[in-house]
Image (cartoon, helix red, strand yellow):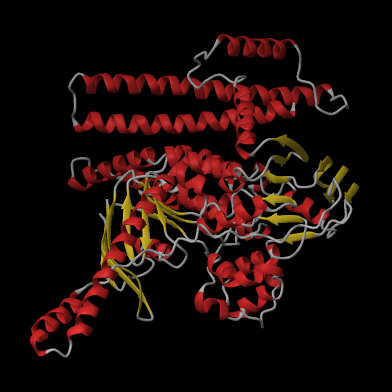
Amino acid sequence: MVSVNDLTMEFSARPIFSDVSFVINKTDKIGLAGKNGAGKSTLLKIISGLQQPTSGTVSKPTEVTIGYLPQQMKLADDTSIINEARKAFAHIDEHKARLDDLNNQLATRTDYESDSYAKLIEDIEYLNDRLSMEGADNMEAEVEKTLIGLGFNREDFDRPTSEFSGGWRMRVELAKILLQKPDLLLLDEPTNHLDIESIQWLEQFLQTKAKAVMLVSHDRAFLDNVTRRTIEISCGKAYDYKVSYTPYTELRKERVEQQMRAYENQQKQIADIKAFIERFRYQATKAIQVQSRIKQLEKIVPIEVDEVDNSRLRLKFPPAPRSGDFPLILEDVGKAYGDHQVFDHAEFRIRRGEKVAFVGKNGEGKSTLVKCIMGEIDHTGMLKLGHNVKIGYFAQNQAQLLDENLTVFETIDNVAVGDIRLKIRDILGAFMFGGEASDKKVKVLSGGEKTRLAMIKLLLEPVNFLILDEPTNHLDLKTKDILKDAIRDFDGTVIVVSHDRDFLDGLVEKVYEFGGGKVKENLGGIYDFLRSKNLENLRDLELTKSPTGKQVSEATVSEADVNTKSSQQEPAKPQNSQKLSYAEQKAKDKVLKKAEKKVKDAEAEIERLESLQKEIEDKIASGDSSQETLDAYSKAQKNLENGMSLWELATMELEELQQRN
């Protein structure tokens, strides 16, 4: 589908990569791997057509479409969230306008036998088929479902984009790209601004609905769940593995070991040749052999070994000063901004040495509670820090607090104590400040480099309570592993606010979930928490029929029947204690019945479409492989997919209404 041929890219005469070649097939799910600066983002820009290589080409058929999400982009602020997302279907609006124009022409034409009239009919049929295939009738449902999947509430849809942070507006741009359903999706760090639930939704979308995908991500779990192929850019070359990220790391380890053995053998060969030359350089009887060895030495192509594996480096923090048994105690803590209650009645205790995670959708109060703990904002209830608690806090704006006139080395040397000072260069190298980079002034560093430097500075300070707010956003996979090991070995208390499941796995023993104005304690690790959430979702789904109306199990059916009968016998009770008036309750019931009918109509339509698809499948099975039949089958598949989307949206609306009632 897309062919990358002998790409070479240079910056300031310095090669980034050279002679890179590979093919992206129609259904490939590819992860781009390599250290920071290897050229991953540059390669995505070249494939998308936004940047030209020094040499080489990218070939693709003209009909192949590409969607590209960069790490940074200019975001529009001139409309609402829903209208900005609708821009993904601008081409459909153009098709509709063109179709209206052709239909108007058709209404006034009388030259029924002319070639131009036949051409007009043909164009109308083509546009009708095109709109049907692209799901024009299902456009609104797709927009809403995608925005909800990426974490937006319905109440947000009509709000101006200017009211949202850059991270939320980036979600809108991602939604637009996904809605366009390009043949190839190029995603550069798509999970940086997503919470865990949105990441899981994106995983499901990329697995089931996306065509070809190539992505850069530092989220190992995301890569393993989405990709089935890994292309590594290392030492200017591309290595192609037909496996996801974790198996790739094992294969890469074997490759590096082979390179090292070949390198050592070559170095021994070079040393032997040089020794021969030096020994017999001035002997006339050996002149021919010496010249032969010199030519042999000149022809040797040095073997390059991939970047040094520093995974054995262990970052050991200074011992944490002893704190009280409970470094943090909350009793009936709440926080509101005006009429908006972020969370309320939060009650829990964190024991000394515990490592816990704060998770939940963005905007549910994770960072707000952290600010309450730090004393930056006021709150209701009692929040108490234990005896001798010394907090080390990493906020997302931590980089702005660095002294820009110091060098990278001086910044760390000023806070390092004890034996750790002897390993500053190693630590800086592990965090991608090796060699000359350690002598750079802070003011010339990029935003990501400043964030990493702030992380090192914080983690070397003698504290006993670490609070880390999204600490992994700018760290590559190897550096995250080093950081994770260091936090795991830290003998103090830790709160991590993160959406990175792989980073949290094996690190935290308790998860606090923020949502619906509450803070809920969940014992166990991050995957224990996610499994419990999935079970809850399955229990909720038991109350809803499958799209085709098929019964899953007796227990499910009987429970659904009981709920249905009880709902028919008793009117829905309001959640609040005040009794609704007869007119208000009647209006609510009417809306609920309308939503229930919408679900039933969607189910009936799915049954009809499934029956139609089965008929076409039977025709194909009996030997009818004409283009007309194949086109009909493709159209039926598309219509069924659109019908399923409408059913999902109607079901979500019904569940929301049932919860409110």
Residue 341 located left or right of residue 535 = right
Q: Is residue 390 above or below residue 405?
A: above
Residue 149 located left or right of residue 576 = left
Front-most of 445 and 661?
445
Residue 57 located left or right of residue 173 = left
Asked whether residue 640 appears in the rendered view, the answer is yes
Quadrant of the image occupied by residue 533: top right
Front-most of 140 and 1?
1
Front-most of 304 and 142?
304
Quadrant of the image occupied by residue 237: bottom left
**Could you tell me residue 592's position as x and y percent?**
67, 24
Quadrant of the image occupied by residue 114: top left
Q: Is residue 136 above or below residue 553?
A: below
| Image quadrant where one finds the C terminus | top right
Count the labels in the image.
Answer: 0
Front-most of 412 and 519?
412
**Could you tell me residue 545's position as x and y percent?**
56, 19
